[in-house]
Image (tube, rainbow, N blue to C red):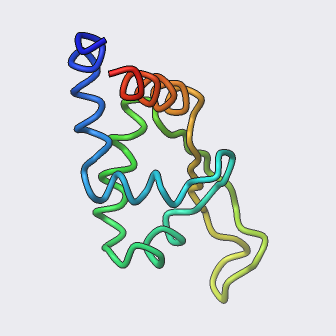
Amino acid sequence: MLEKLVKDEDYFYFILHPIRFKILTELQPIGSELSISDLENKLKVSKQLIIFHVLLLEQYSFITSRLSISEIPTNKTKGKAIKTIKITPKFNKYMEKLKKTLLNW
């Protein structure tokens, strides 16, 4: 059992980075979608920092994102591009595996 935990240790530490962990926590419950601006408001950190960590989480396939156009027009444009993110099944599977490993340890 310990070998499995050590094998997944990189993911474990990757997820536990304070900002990435907060992003993943805000995306709970499963299926919730938030925009980068929503995360910026909730986490009180810069948009650039959130984007950096979102890109890392996407590279590991722990979250997925999509671009859409807002329905609310602004003064200068008819709509604004919005990037929304949500947790992937891969992240959920990893967390279940981690829970089982820790409970059996």
Relative image position of residue 45 (x, y in whole percent): 32, 74
Q: Camera-side residue: 48 or 78? A: 48
- Outermost residue on the front side: it is 104
Relative image position of residue 95 (x, y in whole percent): 47, 32
- Outermost residue on the right side: it is 71
Residue 19 in the image: above or below residue 12 = below
Q: How many marks?
A: 0
In this rendering, position of residue 24 left or right of residue 20: right
Going 50% across and 40% down the picture, which residue do you hit? 63
Relative image position of residue 48 (x, y in whole percent): 30, 64
Q: Tell me the quarter of the image containing the N terminus.
A: top left
Q: Camera-side residue: 34 or 105? A: 105
Residue 95 in the image: above or below residue 51 = above
Q: Based on the displayed image, in which of its 4 quarters is residue 40 positioned?
A: bottom left
Q: Camera-side residue: 104 or 47? A: 104
Residue 29 in the image: above or below residue 6 = below
Going 47% across and 79% down the picture, which residue do you hit? 41
Going 43% across and 57% down the picture, which residue do you hit? 23
Going 56% across and 56% down the picture, which residue do you hit? 83
In this rendering, position of residue 32 left or right of residue 51: right
Relative image position of residue 100 (x, y in whole percent): 46, 23
In this rendering, position of residue 52 left or right of residue 31: left
